[in-house]
Image (cartoon, grey):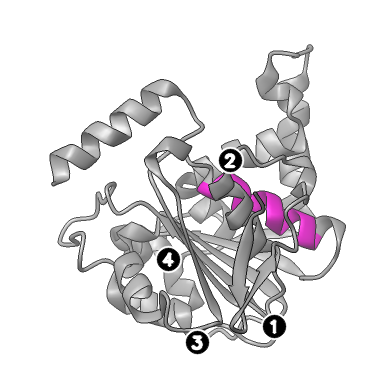
Amino acid sequence: TKLAKEKGGVISYLEYEDATPFGVTPRNVGQRFCIEALMAPASEIPLVIIHGDAGTAKTFLTLACALQQTYLDHIYREITVTRANVEFDREIGALPGDETEKVGPLLRGCMDNLETLVDPAYVSGKTKDGLEEEVHDKVMDLFDRGCISAEALGFLRGRSLKRKILFVDEAQNITISQAKGILTRAGEDCKIVIAGCLSQIDTPHITRRTNGLAYALKLMGGKSSSCAVCTFKESEITRSRLAGEIAAAMKREGE
């Protein structure tokens, strides 16, 4: 068998099937298709929507492909990461610190993944004295070099992002209004990645059908060659067996 995709009315082999972005080797078919969409140039696929249960490596794969294309290949200038929190967006201006420090508490999941990517030994048990501080310094160096920036959703209004990757994490918690604002931020050579899980909505007044992720899927999914939708199966959860069982239980609870 061979993995393939439909492109221009023709079935073609995956172009990045053997890719290992930032040293990451895909573990299943879903991850291979996800990497294919994430590694495709913005001129071909400027919008990627990823949805699936917790533990399917949505954030991990996005950051790996983004670092490959910015830090190593210099295709894009910067990775801009944002994550939804409606109340936080309203009050961010009153919080102390610069923009990255203000948004930082919302990006713990991204930071965990970045630590794994910059030094896999950190989570493999091959630890040494001072390694935790060393790994943290490597991650912060990515921010200091301008490779990655963290921004609140509210700060994206009026922006035109050029030659950047905009990554919206936990997109099931953004509003439809915020989704509309995000989808119109793309400038020249900009790639937008929206990721989330429709079973993990924790923002008040947003439902499975009235959130920004669902809106983006309905608006663009299967309706434009500029958008690729990556849907992970329950069997493709790679975090742990417990994570898989909990995700399945949560899905049954919501039905």
Which of 80 and 220 lies nearest the eye of the viewer?
Answer: 220
Residue type at the position of mark 2: Asn
Q: Residue at x 78, y 50 (%)?
A: 18
Residue type at the position of mark 3: Gly
Q: Is residue 146 visible?
A: no
Q: Badge 3: few (under 14), some or many (20 or more) residues near its Cα, within 10 Å?
A: few
Residue under numbered circle 1: 43
Mark 3 and mark 1 in contact? Answer it, CB < 8 Å: no
Q: Is residue 247 above or below residue 222?
A: above
Residue type at the position of mark 1: Ser
Closer to the chain start, of discs 2 and 1, is: 2
Closer to the chain start, of discs 3 and 1, is: 1
Q: Magenta residues? A: 58-70
Q: Is residue 8 visible?
A: yes
Mark 3 and mark 4 in contact? Answer it, CB < 8 Å: no
Closer to the chain start, of discs 2 and 4, is: 2
Q: Residue at x 78, y 12 (%)?
A: 129
Residue under numbered circle 2: 28
Closer to the chain start, of discs 3 and 2, is: 2
Observer-side mark, 2 or 1, equals 2
Q: Residue at x 68, y 77 (%)?
A: 42
Residue type at the position of mark 4: Gly
Observer-side mark, 3 or 4, equals 3
Q: Residue at x 55, y 84 (%)?
A: 159
Residue under numbered circle 4: 93
